[in-house]
Amino acid sequence: MSRSEVDLPDRYPELLVELGDRVRAAQAHAVRTVNRELVGLYWQIGHTILREQRDQPWGAGVVGRLADDLRAAFPTMTGLSRSNLQYMRAFAAEWPEEVNVPQAVGHLPWGHIRLLFDKLETRQSREWYAAKATEHGWSRDALLNHIKNQTLERSGAAPSNFEVRLPEADSDLAQQLSKDPYVFDFLDLTEGAAERDFEQALLARITQTLAELGAGFAFVGRQVHFEVDGDDFYVDLLFFHTEQLRYVVVELKKGRFEPAFAGQLGFYVALVDDKLRRAVHAQTVGILICGDKSEQTVRYALGQTASPMAVSTYTYESLPAAEKVALPTADQLIAALEVGD
């Protein structure tokens, strides 16, 4: 009997999908397990090197000799180079109190972890980016891009009135939705572009726009129409945050912040909160993105509006990447760690 002539049960297609999902889930689990074991092994190697160097000075070339001997003993295993052993040592030194590696870092590939040491200076920043990379599944290139664009420094940095307009726990969550400034290099616009061009460009590059806004933002609509007593009103951009379960109204202004902008945004926030928000949703918030702002003017304006909102700026120029690295070059590191005879 040929394959096409087999009498298949009614539920066979569903069964095939179910088993395929199980196979893929098992494969993904196996990859994660292998990665955690490898990262744990690297921490243990680094921890052992640290311990031995504390007990007795190592002569010049000991780390290099150790790398050569390990590669000779395990010829099919990559990652046992002299420079990689130095990263392992730095890795264990960063988290010396851990029985093993911390959870967020332990879920990252080793290339991600090396990048954290190459581009960041503090344990706090490394742990923040590690947690975000683990949570959102960032590739190594995505992680590098977030570090270069200083996502940590910009996250939650926009001045807002969330603290006084929202309950404490909710205000902390809402603050995390804002950045200051937003980096819109991908728009390829000139400084003279009109607000409508700005808005259209953001939507034309919606994937990059959502990535810059942050994880959890889902696009709802552009120029969303509301009618109030026969008058028409249009919200520039409306998003829904899938993790916080709240609508986010975004208004775009090309020029410098003016107090009237806060009143307009507050009106739109109130509209969305009344017309679209459901009982299960958190309170609607607004984000005004403008070309420039006076911090004092923003503070006065936000103090007079009852709607929860933040005011951010934007730039077309990439923020300067932190060029200082936590690790020096491999040769410098080796010279510092290996005490001469």
Image (spheres, grey):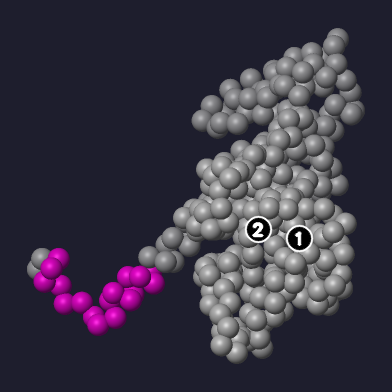
Q: Position of residue 99 (x, y in %)?
A: 80, 49
Q: Residue at x 57, y 66 (%)?
A: 237
Category of crowding for the residue at label 1, using alpha-carbon neighbours closer than 10 angstroms: few (below 14), some (14–19), many (at least 20) = some
274 w.r.t. 119: above or below: below
Work out whether residue 2 can be spotted.
Answer: yes
Q: Would residue 126 appear left or right of 201 to someone viewing this image?
A: right
Q: What mark, if any, has residue 25 been given in the picture?
A: none
Q: Which residues are magenta?
A: 3-19
Q: Which residue is mark 2?
A: 253
Q: What mark, if any, has residue 258 been given in the picture?
A: 1
Q: Would residue 145 appear left or right of 313 to someone viewing this image?
A: left
Label 2 with label 1: CB-CB less than 8 Å? yes
Q: Nearer the viewer, residue 100 or 170?
A: 170
244 w.r.t. 188: above or below: below
Give the CA separation, mark 2 to mark 1: 10 Å
User: Is residue 52 inside the magenta stretch?
Assistant: no
